[in-house]
């Protein structure tokens, strides 16, 4: 990799983050690589001059993420527009998205600079919320968008259409529209299927549906999904990747479709998706 600009994003809650960050910044600078730190990371090192995360994503050639899957989801949204490759270093429990274990950090960085890696492109979603014909919010996500009830509501009612064709009226606690990457997140907890990220599809998973015949539905990755809130629910929300909330009111429609952008995860040829599944879900060794 010819990159000379590495942006570093961290999750400060992990105790190993500060010493790891100190070590990796020193290691990179010794190799004449420009290190860009967001304000959080700069504060951890007691350095001045940290930049905003959006600015960092607009300048860096690669994002090095020290954290867990949640930090990667944040990085994926930041990196989406420029499709910057992301290398995730696992600081917590085993993640589906983080590629590198902490004890293998430096050998992994050596391999990245030696071009000994592959890019794993992941489908992303984009959404815009319409209210009275106006777009009131928009966003992009790697895992999912969840449209769910407020804390006091018993259930919400949603009208679902795909490619302009009416599908169903759903009464439930909510609906998850996820990518294959997000199939092992909230969708899985709600009874959705596991989908290999190489499959270009979207998954609609009802959350505690009132009618048991409502089941997860897998649709092609190139369709537009319209989800309209038809019930009068105070506090109903559209939540992107579990991190960004958009308030919805009766009559609002969230239009969800695949984004033109992809998340590019740096992978090493010997790492396998099914191995991560087996370890994460504690399946038998066979």
Image (cartoon, rainbow, N blue to C red):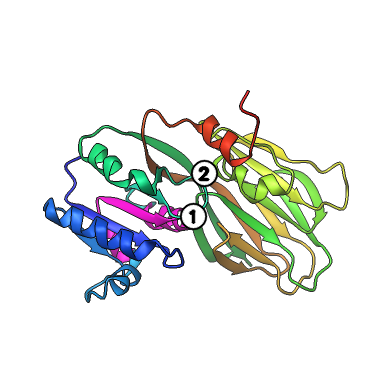
Relative to 95, residue 151 above or below: below
Of residues 37 and 95, the one nearer the viewer is 95
> Can the viewer see residue 181?
yes
Residue 133 lies left or right of residue 16; in this view the side is right
Task: Kindly identify which residue carries mark 2.
Answer: 96
Is 58 one of the magenta-colored residues?
Answer: yes
Task: Identify the secondary structure beneath mark 2.
Answer: loop
Across and down, in percent, residue 24 comes to 25, 56
Across and down, in percent, residue 92 comes to 49, 55
Residue 131 lies left or right of residue 72; in this view the side is right
Q: Main secondary structure of the magenta part?
A: helix
> Can the viewer see residue 57?
no
Relative to 55, residue 143 above or below: above
Of residues 177 and 64, the one nearer the viewer is 64
State which quarter of the image contains the N terminus.
top left
Toward the top, the furthest residue is 286
Relative to 217, residue 234 above or below: below
Task: Identify the secondary structure beneath mark 1.
Answer: loop
Q: Residue at x 69, y 70 (%)?
A: 249
Residue 128 lies left or right of residue 190; in this view the side is left
Marks 2 and 1, how far apart at CA:
11 Å
Crowd around label 2: few <14 · some 14–19 · many ≥20 (10 Å): some
Task: Kindly identify which residue carries mark 1.
Answer: 92
Q: Residue at x 30, y 61 (%)?
A: 21
Across and down, in percent, residue 238 comes to 63, 62
Crowd around label 1: few <14 · some 14–19 · many ≥20 (10 Å): some
Give the residues drawn in magenta, as a range: 54-79
| Quarter of the view holding residue 16 | bottom left
Of residues 176 and 230, the one nearer the viewer is 176
């Amino acid at each position: 990799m010819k990159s000379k600009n590495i942006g570093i994003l961290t999750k400060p809650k992990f105790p190993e983050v500060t010493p790891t960050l100190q070590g990796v910044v020193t290691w990179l600078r010794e190799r004449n690589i420009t290190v860009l730190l967001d304000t959080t990371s700069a504060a951890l090192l007691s350095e001045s001059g940290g930049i905003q995360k959006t600015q960092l994503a607009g300048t860096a050639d690669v994002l090095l993420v020290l954290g867990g899957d949640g930090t990667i989801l944040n990085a994926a949204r930041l990196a989406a527009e420029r499709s910057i490759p992301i290398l995730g270093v696992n600081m917590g429990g085993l993640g589906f998205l983080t590629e590198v274990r902490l004890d293998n950090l430096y050998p992994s960085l050596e391999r990245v600079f030696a071009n000994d890696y592959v890019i794993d492109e992941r489908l992303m979603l984009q959404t815009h919320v319409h209210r009275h014909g106006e777009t009131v919010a928009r966003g992009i996500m790697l895992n999912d968008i969840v449209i769910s009830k407020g804390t006091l509501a018993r259930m919400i009612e949603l009208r679902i259409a795909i490619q302009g064709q009416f599908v169903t009226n759903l009464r439930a606690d909510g609906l998850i529209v996820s990518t294959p990457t997000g199939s092992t997140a909230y969708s899985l907890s709600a009874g959705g299927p596991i989908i290999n990220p190489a499959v270009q599809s979207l998954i609609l998973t009802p959350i505690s549906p009132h009618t048991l015949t409502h089941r997860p539905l897998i649709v092609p990755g190139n369709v537009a999904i319209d989800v309209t809130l038809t019930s009068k629910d105070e506090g109903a929300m559209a939540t992107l990747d579990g991190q960004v909330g958009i308030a919805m009111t009766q009559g609002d429609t969230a239009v969800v479709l695949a984004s033109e952008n992809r998340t590019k995860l740096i992978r090493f040829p010997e790492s396998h998706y099914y191995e991560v599944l087996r370890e994460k879900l504690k399946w038998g060794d066979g």
